[in-house]
Image: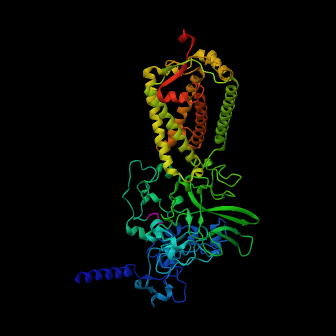
């Protein structure tokens, strides 16, 4: 019991000290003389007896100094320079004691305001909310949506710094029963506006280092509390980067390609992309009063809206609200940045939200915002943003049509050629009947050759399947996109290791010679093989060259495999490795044009692989007495080859 009394006494003592910490204030008039009844009190002069009012006034920006009407403030935030009043002196109590009565009422006959009657303190979030956004930290009373007019401080973005859970608010919002989280997690966790938007010289705020600080990680020098209270900088800082408080690497271990995502996306792009409130969509200033159009609300209820993700000053995608402003018959678009309404419940976690044809990054833009410097070509004719103009290639969403069309044309041409050739062989078989040449069984493929071949075939086939899901995920909505990415990466490394081991085997055994076309293959034997495929095969003629374990490939196969193993396969592996390693070696990837170039090239090479597989599988049907003889030989190792005159004699 005694402990409780002691604690209560300490708390009461603290409260008492809090009320008497600030000294009594002798009131002064505009000339700096003691205030007399009937005169106007100068807050700047009165507070300036202890605080450097000229310094404070100098560091404040114009909107905080001028007494603007709501209409003037509205025009200012639209980027329009309104007719503003003359610069006025600082009104300290507007922010530091917004609920305070007039000082003249509190003053004693000597013109002194007793400290016990003051409620001075750092600006509260509600004080900031008088001009900025809609703010409510009290969770005991239901939050009411501000009226949709010029006085709505949340109009430009719909951001509401409210600690209350949406489901407990007084807002009629869609799916309210499941929105069991606060409007803003920072408000819920009792962070005030001043915690992030601190005075630049606040000794308790993180102090940035000068650009010439080569060896210093932290500078312990700072203002004393006395000096800060004397000259507090009122040029309030922009909000601290999220990384100053949050370790994104630890909290996003589930996210693949972290570095790549963090270098291209602001935290708000995922955590503030959906705004649970209405915002301005269009403003017509040519009407009186101004005609306002809203998004995120219908006649029945609030729906919220999806923000536009556009490149910010750092080139990272960040959420904005776009407002069409009509003035003097001309319409322009302005973008308003979104930094609040942060929560984890509506944060983007599904890969398909961005990596699909319905990507959140592909919201139509009818006109480039005049207050943002977007990359050239970012806004295209159909209104969809061209992310490649910003150096962004979004797997599953971005697709360079030329790469797909060229690849598809190559595949169609290959299939058409195979079909025409196969139909010719079938008609020749109908005309000539079955023709069986003398054959003998030869052990053609060693165990390792068969293992290497089938492992490579399986890896390439699965890479093509998983690659198709990654390239066009909306066609395979039932398949997990992130799992396909992981499987694709694993298969890529399996193919790489298999290729390296195969290269070592073929070099060590001398088998590499079979894949190197000789001059005779290029200038003489190649044409004999072409003549066989275009003529002899339809007449039942034997193969022009004997197939042996030492000479497995005909001249055309040598040329094809030489191109495959020295160009197509290495190029596909290199582009795939650079795409995978873009977050680890971004500079290396950028030397090859970055993902904007690597992605389309990798895609076209995949089409080329499909065309090669079609041709390769078809040509196996020409190597034996049966259509499946070639595949059977690669499974068993033994192949039935034609008997030449040399072996007959």
- Quadrant for the N terminus in the image: bottom left
The single residue placed furthest to the front in the displayed view is 433
Residue 383 x, y percent position in the rendering: 69, 55
Q: Is residue 446 left or right of residue 144?
A: left
- Answer above or below: position of 626 versus 196: above
Q: Is residue 206 left or right of residue 564?
A: left
Can see residue 588? no
Can see residue 184? yes
Q: Main secondary structure of the magenta part?
A: loop
Residue 178 x, y percent position in the rendering: 51, 71
Query: Is residue 200 covered in magenta?
Result: yes
Q: Is residue 421 left or right of residue 636?
A: right
- Quadrant for the C terminus in the image: top right
* Magenta segment: 197-201
Residue 373 x, y percent position in the rendering: 63, 54
- Answer above or below: position of 373 versus 278: above
- Answer above or below: position of 388 versus 77: above
The single residue placed furthest to the right in the displayed view is 329
- Where residue 497 sits, quadrant-wise, is top left
Along the viewing direction, whichever of 165 and 48 lies nearer the viewer? 165
Q: How are the colours assigned in the image?
A: rainbow
Residue 610 x, y percent position in the rendering: 59, 37
The single residue placed furthest to the top in the displayed view is 649
Give the residue drawn at x 59%, y 57%. 360
Query: Is residue 5 covered in magenta?
Result: no
- Where residue 226 sits, quadrant-wise, is bottom left
């Amino acid at each position: 019991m005694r402990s409780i009394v002691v604690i209560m006494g300490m708390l009461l003592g603290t409260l008492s000290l809090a009320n008497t910490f600030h000294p009594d204030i002798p009131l002064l008039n505009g000339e700096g003389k003691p205030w007399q009844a009937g005169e106007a009190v100068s807050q700047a002069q009165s507070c300036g007896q202890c605080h450097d009012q000229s310094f404070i006034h100098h560091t404040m920006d114009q909107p905080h100094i001028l007494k603007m009407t709501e209409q003037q403030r509205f025009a200012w935030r639209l980027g329009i320079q309104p007719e503003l009043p003359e610069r006025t002196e600082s009104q300290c109590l507007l922010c530091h004691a917004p609920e305070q009565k007039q000082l003249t009422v509190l003053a004693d006959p000597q013109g002194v305001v007793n400290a016990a009657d003051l409620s001075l303190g750092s600006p509260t979030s509600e004080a900031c909310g008088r001009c900025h956004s809609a703010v409510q930290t009290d969770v005991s009373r239901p939050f009411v949506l501000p009226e949709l007019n010029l006085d709505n401080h949340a109009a430009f973005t719909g951001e509401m710094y409210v600690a209350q859970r949406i489901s407990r608010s007084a807002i009629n919002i869609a799916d309210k029963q499941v929105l069991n989280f606060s409007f803003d997690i920072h408000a819920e966790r009792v962070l005030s506006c001043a915690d992030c938007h601190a005075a630049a010289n606040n000794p308790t705020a993180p102090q940035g280092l000068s650009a010439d600080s080569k060896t210093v990680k932290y500078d312990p020098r700072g203002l004393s509390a006395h000096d800060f209270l004397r000259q507090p900088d009122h040029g309030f800082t922009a909000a601290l980067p999220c990384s100053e408080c949050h370790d994104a690497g630890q909290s996003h271990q589930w996210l693949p390609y972290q570095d790549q995502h963090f270098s291209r996306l602001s935290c708000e792009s995922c955590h503030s992309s959906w705004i649970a409130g209405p915002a301005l969509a269009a403003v017509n200033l040519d009407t009186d009063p101004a005609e306002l159009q809203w998004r995120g609300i219908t006649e029945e209820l609030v729906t919220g809206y999806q923000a536009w993700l556009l490149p910010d000053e750092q080139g990272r995608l960040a959420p904005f609200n776009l407002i069409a402003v009509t003035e003097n018959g001309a319409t322009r678009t302005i973008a308003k940045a979104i930094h609040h309404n942060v929560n984890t419940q509506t944060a983007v976690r599904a890969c398909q939200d961005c990596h699909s044809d319905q990507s959140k990054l592909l919201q139509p833009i009818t006109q480039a915002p005049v207050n943002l410097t977007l990359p050239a070509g970012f806004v295209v004719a159909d209104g969809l943003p061209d992310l490649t103009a910003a150096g962004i290639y979004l797997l599953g969403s971005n697709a360079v049509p030329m790469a797909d069309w060229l690849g598809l044309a190559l595949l169609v041409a290959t299939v058409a050629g195979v079909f025409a050739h196969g139909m010719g062989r079938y008609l020749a078989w109908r005309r000539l009947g079955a023709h069986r040449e003398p054959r003998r069984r030869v052990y053609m493929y060693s165990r390792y050759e068969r293992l290497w071949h089938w492992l490579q075939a399986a890896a390439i086939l699965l890479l093509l399947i998983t690659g198709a899901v990654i390239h066009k995920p909306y066609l395979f909505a039932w398949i997990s996109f992130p799992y396909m990415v992981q499987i694709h990466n694993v298969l890529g490394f399996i193919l790489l290791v298999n290729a390296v081991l195969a290269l070592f085997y073929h070099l060590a055994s001398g088998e590499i010679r079979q894949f190197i076309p000789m001059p005779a293959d290029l200038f003489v034997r190649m044409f004999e093989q072409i003549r066989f495929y275009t003529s002899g095969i339809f007449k039942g003629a034997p193969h022009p060259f004997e197939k042996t374990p030492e000479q497995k490939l005909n001249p055309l196969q040598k040329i094809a495999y030489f191109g495959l193993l020295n160009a197509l396969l290495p190029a596909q592996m290199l582009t795939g490795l650079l795409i995978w390693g873009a977050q680890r070696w971004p500079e290396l990837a950028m030397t090859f044009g970055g993902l904007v170039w690597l992605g389309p090239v990798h895609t076209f090479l995949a089409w080329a692989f499909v065309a090669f597989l079609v041709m390769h599988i078809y040509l196996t049907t020409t190597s034996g007495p049966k259509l499946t003889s070639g595949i059977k030989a690669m499974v068993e190792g033994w192949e039935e080859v034609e008997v030449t005159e040399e072996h007959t004699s």
